[in-house]
Amino acid sequence: MKPNMGGTDRIIRLIVAAIAVALYFTGTLTGTLGIIALVVAAVFTLTSVVSFCPLYTIFGLNTCSVK
């Protein structure tokens, strides 16, 4: 897996994931929507940590400055 996510993408994904988790645990997002938000948050966190997004590969995107 070659990194295809830049630093800005990683930070944005981590912020969105943190917001989704906070909304779930404060009770703002509940039920099915809350579970979906947690799953998306987990995926965003994982892809940020490994700097690789499979969808970027499918769509031919690469925001990583290191080639």
Image (cartoon, rainbow, N blue to C red):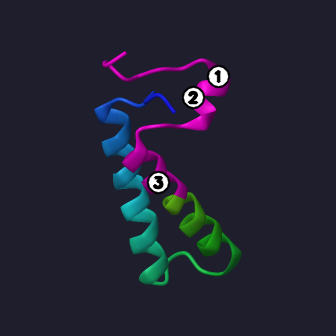
Provide residue 56's location: percent of width, then percent of height.
57, 28
Marks 3 and 2 sit apart, C-alpha to C-alpha, by: 14 Å
Q: Which residue is mark 3?
A: 46
Q: Vertical placement of 62 versus 42: above or below?
A: above
Question: What amino acid is labelled 2 in the image?
Answer: Tyr
Question: What amino acid is labelled 1 in the image?
Answer: Phe
Q: Residues within 10 Å of mark 2 (few under 14, many from 20)?
A: few
Question: What amino acid is labelled 3 in the image?
Answer: Leu
Which picture quadrant has residue 45? Answer: bottom left
Which picture quadrant has residue 67? Answer: top left
Q: Which residue is mark 1?
A: 59
Tell me the magenta residue range. 43-67
Q: Earlier in the sequence, mark 1 or mark 3?
A: 3
Residue at figure coordinates x 38%, y 49% from the top left: 49
Which sits in the foreground, 37 or 59?
59
Q: Earlier in the sequence, mark 3 or mark 2?
A: 3
Residue 50 counted in the magenta span: yes
> In the structure shown, which secondary structural element does the residue marked by tag 1 occupy?
helix
